[in-house]
Image: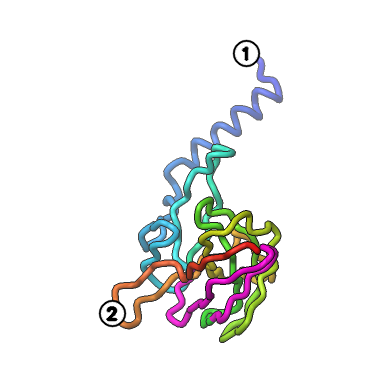
Amino acid sequence: MRTTPLAAAVAATAALALGACGTAPAPEAPAGPIVLRSSATSGTPTPSATPTTPATGGAAPVVPDVRDADAEVGVQDQAGDGRSVLVEEVVLGSGPGHAVVVDRSTRAVLGSAPVRAGTSRDVAVALSTPVPRSGEYLVMLYADDGDGTFEETRDGLVVEADDDGGGDDGGSVDEDFRYTLR
């Protein structure tokens, strides 16, 4: 029987592949539990489950939540032309982040503004999508991933850390407000 170079290469590749089976231990899974995005249970960033994205059918990126015991956001009901929102105060202890305005009914992001670590007052959020109607809106806090630009698929949602035993652990740091179009 005559062996061709192609057949020899295929046989050698198969032998190497089969020989490697079972020799190296499988990598271990992370020790912590896998939790859903807004129910962080430990340490600073916490792994999130990978949801399926309906538009593509594939997996959405996994972005860890960022627990911050100092985080707060304050916004008042307001009226305007729908192109900006004024956030009275943002407090971030975990580092710089973003104040993000969201339409409560559609969950669409309307705009964001960068905020520094510590306390920021009178943060003007220019909306890339104007407020479509008078109604209820939400300001949420996200921790910046280091690039200074808000990207929902890369920046971690800031969640509360239960440092006072009040049972508020893991909820997103946000505040709702009413916006009236003039």
For the residue pair 58 and 106, the one nearer the viewer reads as: 106
Which residue is farthest top? 1
Q: Quadrant of the C terminus?
A: bottom right
- The amino acid type found where label 2 is placed reads Gly
Q: How many marks?
A: 2
> Which residue lies at the image location 60% right of the left edge and 84% below the top edge?
120
- As measured in the structure, the alpha-carbon distance from the residue carrying label 1 to the one carrying label 2 is 78 Å
> Which residue lies at the image location 57% right of the left edge and 59% below the top edge?
134
Q: Quadrant of the N terminus?
A: top right
- The amino acid type found where label 1 is placed reads Met
Q: Give how far across and how far down residue 127 sits, in percent.
A: 68, 63
For the residue pair 170 and 177, the one nearer the viewer reads as: 177
Q: Which residue is mark 2?
A: 165
Q: Which residue is mark 1?
A: 1
For the residue pair 168 and 34, the one nearer the viewer reads as: 168
Which residue is farthest front? 182
- Report which quarter residue 55 is drawn in: top right
**Sooner in the amino-acid sequence: mark 1 or mark 2:** 1
Of badges 1 and 2, the one in the foreground is: 2
- Report which quarter residue 95 is drawn in: bottom right
> Which residue lies at the image location 70% right of the left edge and 20% below the top edge?
4
